Image (cartoon, rainbow, N blue to C red):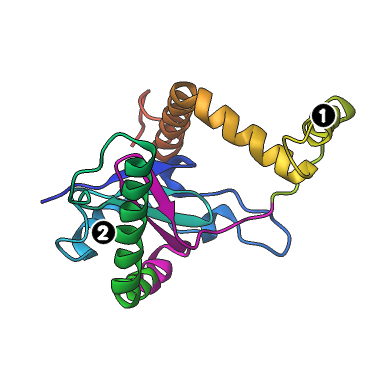
Amino acid sequence: MMSGRMHRGWPGGRGRGPGRGGWQQADLPGAEDAAAWLQGRLPDGWFTGAPEVTVDREEILIVGELPPVEGEFPDTEAGRADRAAAVAGRISRFRETTREERIEIARQAEHRYQRKVAWGARIGDTVELFTVASVPVMTRLRQPERIVLDTLVDSGVARSRSDALAWAVKLVGQHADEWLAELREAMARVDELRAKGPTGGDKTA
């Protein structure tokens, strides 16, 4: 029996909605059990172990490990290219042969959790994500922050301010995993305490 691993973009998988004309936090069901639900729903034999399940306010991303490609590939430029081609072919085959079942599982999960579902596959260090959501995020930046983005654009690191902002967020995520994990745990603890409410003290009949 495999056990799914879930990474959450917000405690409980719940988001704080935009307010006017959009969904509210109370409107979005929790996704704490998404990894467990998928564990029971996914067909046996798809992946070599538990898939990695990542949940945020808009999307559930499921990435599973596929069996390694067979054959020996010499540690040469040609050998590495052949191995990369074999890995790409294996992932492509999985994507095509499981398409109909993945669509049905995604439909059920989207109904249950009110989030889009995306898929990916991994072989070793190679990860390929299939159709994933690209969600616009509105924000206001002061001049110092805009100058940082414009510097990234002017230097050719990013094509636009939005690309620069996405690049910066990705960089922070890569170098602050431990801190972000601690922050999420702290927020989850706050949510738990808020749900429990005040306890203790004298009680009157």
- Image x and y of residue 130, in percent: 45, 60
- The label nearer to you, 2 versus 1, is 1
Instruction: Say whether residue 192 is left or right of residue 93.
Output: right
111 in magenta: yes
Residue at the (42%, 45%) spot, across then down: 12
Query: Disc 2 and disc 1: Cα gap in Å?
Result: 45 Å
Q: Are marks 2 and 1 in contact (CB under 8 Å)?
A: no
Position of 115 relative to 160 (above/below): below
Where is mark 1, residue-wise? 151
81 in magenta: no
Query: Which of pointers 2 and 1 lies earlier in the amino acid sequence?
Result: 2
Q: Nearer the viewer, residue 103 or 193?
A: 103
Three-letter residue code for mark 1: Thr
Residue at the (77%, 36%) spot, across then down: 156
Viewer can see residue 72: yes
Residue at the (73%, 60%) spot, across then down: 20
Q: Nearer the viewer, residue 146 or 130?
A: 130
Highlighted magenta segment, given as a residue range: 107-136
- Image x and y of residue 26, in percent: 53, 56
Q: Which mark is residue 37?
A: 2
**Where is residue 93, by image quadrant?**
bottom left
Instruction: Say whether residue 130 is left or right of residue 34.
Output: right
Three-letter residue code for mark 2: Trp
Residue at the (43%, 34%) spot, across then down: 188
Position of 83 relative to 46 (above/below): above
Local SS, label 2? helix
**Where is residue 172, by image quadrant?**
top right
